[in-house]
Every structure is written in structure tokens, then in C-alpha cells.
Amino acid sequence: MRRRPNPWIAIPALVTGLLAGAIGWVVTDVSCETSCAGWATLVSVVSFLVVTIGVVLILALVYRSLAEWDEKKS
């Protein structure tokens, strides 16, 4: 049985990605002696991408395993 992708997975993934990007920006900006907006932007974007992809992967696996468990239970 083929299931459609769950669009609700994207919301918590994007929220955690935005938080990771903001934290990456702040930590990088605070650790610089002078203004280093370029490095802070790079760290922010990389943090956002890594965390968003990781959270999407984990949530997709969790939802899939819960659906399989529910199928077997019924």
C-alpha cells in the first residue's frame, strides 16, 4: 500500500531549522572580534539546512513506523 507524503512534517522541521539558523548566527556573531556578517550568514544557512533535513528525515521515519504499527495493530 502506497501512502501519500504527510505535509505536516514540514512545519516542525522548518521551525527547528529557523531556530538553528538563528542560534548559528548569534553564536558566530558573538564569537567574532569584529563584524563578520559573511561568516555568520554562512553558518546560519548551513545550520538551517542541516537541521531541517535531519528533522524531516527523523519525522518521516517516525510517521512511517507509526503508520506501519497501526496497520499491523488493526
Image (spheres, grey):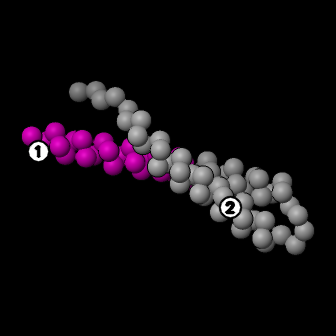
Q: Name the kind of residue labelled 2 in the image.
A: Gly
Q: Which residues are magenta?
A: 51-74
Residue 51 in the image: x percent, y percent? 56, 53
Relative image position of residue 56 (x, y in whole percent): 46, 45
Q: Which mark is residue 24?
A: 2
Q: Position of residue 42 (x, y in %)?
A: 76, 52
Q: Tell me: residue 42, above or below residue 26.
A: above
As drawn, the label of residue 9 is none
| 41 relative to 50 in the view: left or right | right
Principal secondary structure, stretch drawn in magenta: helix
Q: Residue furthest left?
A: 74
Of marks 1 and 2, which one's residue comes earlier in the chain?
A: 2
Pointer 1 residue:
73
Give the left or right position of residue 64, taking residue 68 as reference: right
User: Marks 1 and 2: which is nearer the front?
Assistant: 2
47 and 16: which one is in front?
A: 16
Residue located 84% across and 54% down the image: 38
Q: Residues within 10 Å of mark 2 (few under 14, many from 20)?
A: many
